[in-house]
Amino acid sequence: MSASLLAAVRAAAAGTPSSGAGRPAGADVDEAPAGMVPTAPGNAETAEALHTWLTRFEGQILRRLPSGVDAGPFLAAVRDRLPALEGCSPASILEAVLACASFGFNPDGKEAVLTRDGSLAVFIPTYRGYVRAMTNSGAVTSIRTGLVYACDEFTYEPTRPAPEDFRHVPNLDVKRSERGEPRFAYAFAWLAGGDRSQPVILSREDAEEIRDKHSRAYQRAVAEGREDTFWHTDFWHMATKSCIRRLPKTVPTSAEMHALMAVEEAAEERRPQLEHAPDPEAAALVAEAERAAKAAEGSQDVPPARLPVKGGRGRRKGVKKQRGRRAAARGSA
């Protein structure tokens, strides 16, 4: 991408409109956006004012959406999330929206959500977003996830061949309230060839260890006395997502999946998410350049010269012609 959103993010942080229409000029996108210092909580605009302000950057947002994604539902979902982001820095709101748009996920809570980490807005994919990214590779046809409750029948014998090694039978004869607490989260993939991947299974203790060691957002919340992270509010959803994030170790996956993990890790560490988000516009330009290069190579291909066949008709004519010229030369001499 020849220009970045750096100027727009700076303008956003300053509360001034971006200069000019379209994508603003600036440094390369891999520079850390300036103006990421959050405003004090409670001093940001109201949700309606935030929406009015975001419309200044609608062109940049729409250019980030992959082709085939309907802009209407995306923008509507963004608007619905703005009340929850009041108090976040405008720059972080803009970056979170752009990062979400890059993947074509609607931030409606199904595949992704725009949420807050302190006074920063961040884009967070759900486990369904990870499922979509993984199946986009073409090597994975579907992902199966589940929770094993206390009264379910569940066995896992890794020494047995798949699919005999794994068995989960939910107890549907009892009320949901009587199924007990979840004991395990799991995920596995069905591959294009019909094989099943090795399942990833996490107990509550396993998931808590992942949370405590790797979730910077959870660690900050604990240090600040907050209980507003997804690990606090939706523990088993996060455990399921942790299972899916471990599938790429044994399952072929897409570049989109790796980008999605990098973007979420950037959010955890409060680094700019746009550095890792895919750029559909740049990808389209690269694809067009590759097609043009192949077309140019094809137009320059010269059919190889046909070699004369020994004893063939063409060779005999050539020989007779040559001999005739030699005889004429001798006569004139």
Image (cartoon, rainbow, N blue to C red):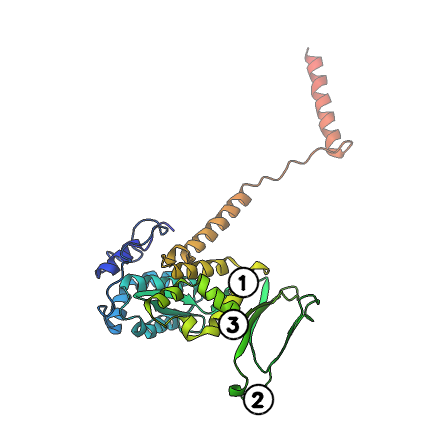
Which of the two residues, 332 or 293, is positioned nearer the viewer here? 293
> What residue sits right under mark 2 in the picture?
174
Q: Is residue 190 above or below residue 325?
A: below
Q: Residue furthest right?
A: 311
Q: Amino acid at mark 3?
A: Arg
Report if the CB atoms under discs 3 and 1 are less than 8 Å apart.
no
Residue 266 sits in which quadrant? Answer: bottom left
Q: Amino acid at mark 2?
A: Val
Q: Residues within 10 Å of mark 1 (few under 14, many from 20)?
A: some
Q: Is residue 47 above or below residue 4?
A: below
Q: Is residue 207 left or right of residue 25?
A: right
* Label 1 secondary element: helix
The spot of residue 190 in percent (x, y) is 61, 67
Q: Is residue 154 left or right of residue 267?
A: right
The spot of residue 244 in percent (x, y) is 53, 66
* Label 2 secondary element: loop
Q: Give residue 204's mark.
A: 3
Judge whether residue 82 can be spotted in this image. yes
The spot of residue 142 in percent (x, y) is 58, 69
Q: Give residue 246's mark.
A: 1
Report if the CB atoms under discs 1 and 2 are less than 8 Å apart.
no
Quadrant in which the C terminus appears: top right
Q: Is residue 318 left or right of residue 251?
A: right
The spot of residue 34 in percent (x, y) is 28, 54
* Label 3 secondary element: helix
Which of the two residues, 214 or 96, is positioned nearer the viewer here? 214
Q: Is residue 23 above or below residue 308?
A: below
Residue drawn 68% across and 68% down?
A: 162
Q: Residues within 10 Å of mark 3 (few under 14, many from 20)?
A: some
Q: CA distance from mark 1 to mark 2?
A: 32 Å
Q: Amino acid at mark 1?
A: Arg
